[in-house]
């Protein structure tokens, strides 16, 4: 704490930020430019009466809806390739007279920051007659190379810094311009410019008979670094997850085998914790977010009550947070720590990964991890020697069936953690499982000891009839687990509410809770083989489950009537708890404890 003679601290509060329609100078932006290839196959209906063209529009709308709900500053645009522009020349005029757009490339939505009106425009397009878009189909294959060139020019025309730039090409044609080798070479040349401009090209094939190996795999390989990712066909169902729920890199660290021997590695996470919506303070008059400030102050009279206060009638003054110190008693002395020193108390090791030793590989996956695993791979900017050393270490550990024990410090001010490094040659890296400390692990031996059976001393009470029935039940009710099948019900309800507000849509039914089992599906499965009747006959009918009673609510009029009575023992435990809960008193304990607590309250009042 600053002394009395210290000069009055002058704290300059930050300038208020502006909200609303004013432009933001800096921000995290990601660009996604969608290109739909208009061919006859795009308008063939499936068994449900849906065309691939409408599936593309739905995917575009889903991505935009998620980004609008997240209040992102991302950019999106939509183009049609191999389109007859003369039919809709008046409906989609160019914004600039000097704009040079290719002949058969139609910009349906200009590439710009997403807005609510853009979503509504695509919704109107989706509801139009399908024949309207079928007439736009053109047989000009030359526009395929032109649209790739036009996509790169579209990104270059935007003078905004973007963290990621992607072009998504949706098509049903797996081998275009087969009879025109000149056009195919032009597509290859224009695809190479994506790599030079750091723009990712992703081709999404539609249709069951679409072959990725014929032509488009080569185009993606030309447009990207071969070592960057494993090239495979990406379906339309994966597109939304790939854009909205993109995987992320936790950090780039040094893997220290020895103090002088380091390998630059990247730590990647597979999942992240979804936070619920955060409440903010807003003005009731303008509905704009309000800035909140926190500062420390102290009363000068607390140091010397007799000293006159000459601060213009203000008995307190602001205190710079950097001047505050934390006191900790060691021995018989108080040691003062500054805020920076307090933050550095947790810092034991330097940021990075330190190799501690090796252990034999476990026969099973680590079951005692308390966090989701990470993946450790070699950094793309590592030197040739570091890459070779990383590959040799991975191969030798996999050959000798060893796993490494290491200490990992991801943040500079974070505490070190122990972890296993388990080699995984298929992906060219290691799985990183955190090892829990002793105080983070519970011992369940006292609870599970009575369920451990032995053939001689404590044989298991097995009934073969019931055992066979349970095996059949497990077989019938088993499902293939997939993490994408289950969503957070609370978060989904909040996102639905935000989407309705952001897009000004009418209230909708809340999304179904995927964590709850389907009663109809279970009943249908148990009805096969008469398993449901066998289960009812096997279960002891004399055993009844006691339902958990809910505490009823009591109004104040009922509470006054109860307090006027002399004998509280006539009341049931539920009624006693309801009265105590209405009076903000504890409801724990036996019935006599509840009566005594109510008598004590009546005597004091």
Image: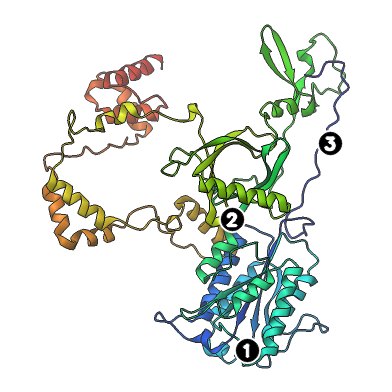
Q: Secondary structure at mark 1?
A: loop
Q: Position of residue 301 (x, y in %)?
A: 78, 14
Instruction: Out of 600 and 116, give the one closest to the viewer.
Output: 116
Neighbour tally class for label 2: few under 14, some 14-19, many 20 plus, Cα within 10 Å: some
Viewport quadrant of the N terminus: top right
Label placed on residue 320: none
Q: Secondary structure at mark 3?
A: loop
> With 285 as the anchor, is 299 left or right in this view?
right
Marks 2 and 1, how far apart at CA? 35 Å
> Is residue 459 among the parts visible in the rendering?
yes
> With 144 as the anchor, is 417 left or right in this view?
left
Label placed on residue 247: 2
Label placed on residue 12: 3
> In the figure, 11 relative to 379: above or below?
above
Instruction: Out of 322 and 428, give the one closest to the viewer.
Output: 428
The figure's colour scheme reads rainbow
Which residue is denoted by mark 1 in the rendering? 177
Check if mark 2's residue and mark 3's residue have beta carbons within 8 Å.
no
Quarter of the image where one finds residue 443: top left
Quarter of the image where one finds residue 179: bottom right
> In the figure, 469 relative to 101: above or below?
above
């Amino acid at each position: 704490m600053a002394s009395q003679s210290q000069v009055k601290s002058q704290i300059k509060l930050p300038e208020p930020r502006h909200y609303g329609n004013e432009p933001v100078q800096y921000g995290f932006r990601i660009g996604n430019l969608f290109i739909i290839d208009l061919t006859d196959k795009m308008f063939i209906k499936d068994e449900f009466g849906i065309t691939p063209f409408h599936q593309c529009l739905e995917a575009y709308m889903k991505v935009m809806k998620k980004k609008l709900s997240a209040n992102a500053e991302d950019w999106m645009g939509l183009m049609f390739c191999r389109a007859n522009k003369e039919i809709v020349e008046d409906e989609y005029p160019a914004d600039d007279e000097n704009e040079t757009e290719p002949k058969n490339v139609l910009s349906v939505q200009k590439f710009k920051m997403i807005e609510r009106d853009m979503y509504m425009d695509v919704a109107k397009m989706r509801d139009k007659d399908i024949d309207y878009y079928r007439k736009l189909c053109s047989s000009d294959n030359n526009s395929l190379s032109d649209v790739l060139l036009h996509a790169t020019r579209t990104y270059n025309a935007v003078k905004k810094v973007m963290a990621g730039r992607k072009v998504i090409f949706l098509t049903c044609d797996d081998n275009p311009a087969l009879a025109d080798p000149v056009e195919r070479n032009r597509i290859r040349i224009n695809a190479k410019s994506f790599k030079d401009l750091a723009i990712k090209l992703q081709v999404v094939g539609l249709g069951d008979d679409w072959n990725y190996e014929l032509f488009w795999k080569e185009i993606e390989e030309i447009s990207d670094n071969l070592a960057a990712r494993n090239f495979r066909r990406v379906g339309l169902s994966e597109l939304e997850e790939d854009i909205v729920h993109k995987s992320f890199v936790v950090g780039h660290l040094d893997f220290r085998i020895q103090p002088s021997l380091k390998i630059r590695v990247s730590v990647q996470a597979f999942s992240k914790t979804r936070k619920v919506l955060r409440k903010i303070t807003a003005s009731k008059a303008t509905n704009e977010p309000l800035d909140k400030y926190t500062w420390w102050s102290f009363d000068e009279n607390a140091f010397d009550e007799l000293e006159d206060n000459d601060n213009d009638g203000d008995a307190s003054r602001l205190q710079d947070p950097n001047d505050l110190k934390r006191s900790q008693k060691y021995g018989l002395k108080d040691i003062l720590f500054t805020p920076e020193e307090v933050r550095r108390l947790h810092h034991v090791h330097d940021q990075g990964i330190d190799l501690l030793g090796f252990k034999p590989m476990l026969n099973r996956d680590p079951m005692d991890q308390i966090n989701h695993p990470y993946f450790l791979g070699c950094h793309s900017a590592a030197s040739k020697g570091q890459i070779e050393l990383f590959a040799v270490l991975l191969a030798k550990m996999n050959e000798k069936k060893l796993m490494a024990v290491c200490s990992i410090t991801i943040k500079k001010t974070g505490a070190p953690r122990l972890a296993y490094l388990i080699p995984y040659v298929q992906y060219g890296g290691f799985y990183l499982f955190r090892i829990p400390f002793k105080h983070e692990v519970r011992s369940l031996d006292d609870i599970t000891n009575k369920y451990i059976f032995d053939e001689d001393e404590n044989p298991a009470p097995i009934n073969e009839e019931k055992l066979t029935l349970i095996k059949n039940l497990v077989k019938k009710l088993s499902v293939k687990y997939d993490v994408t099948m289950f969503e957070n019900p609370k978060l989904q309800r909040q996102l639905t509410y935000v989407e309705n507000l952001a897009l000004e849509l009418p209230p909708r039914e809340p999304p179904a809770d995927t964590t709850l089992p389907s009663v109809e599906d279970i009943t249908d499965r148990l009805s096969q083989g008469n398993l449901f009747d066998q289960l009812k006959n096997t279960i002891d009918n004399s055993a009844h489950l006691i339902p958990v009673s809910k505490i009823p609510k009591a109004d104040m009029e009922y509470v006054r009537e109860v307090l006027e009575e002399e004998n509280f023992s006539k009341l049931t435990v539920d009624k006693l708890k309801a009265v105590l809960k209405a009076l903000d008193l504890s409801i724990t304990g036996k019935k006599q404890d509840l009566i005594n607590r109510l008598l004590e309250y009546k005597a004091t009042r």
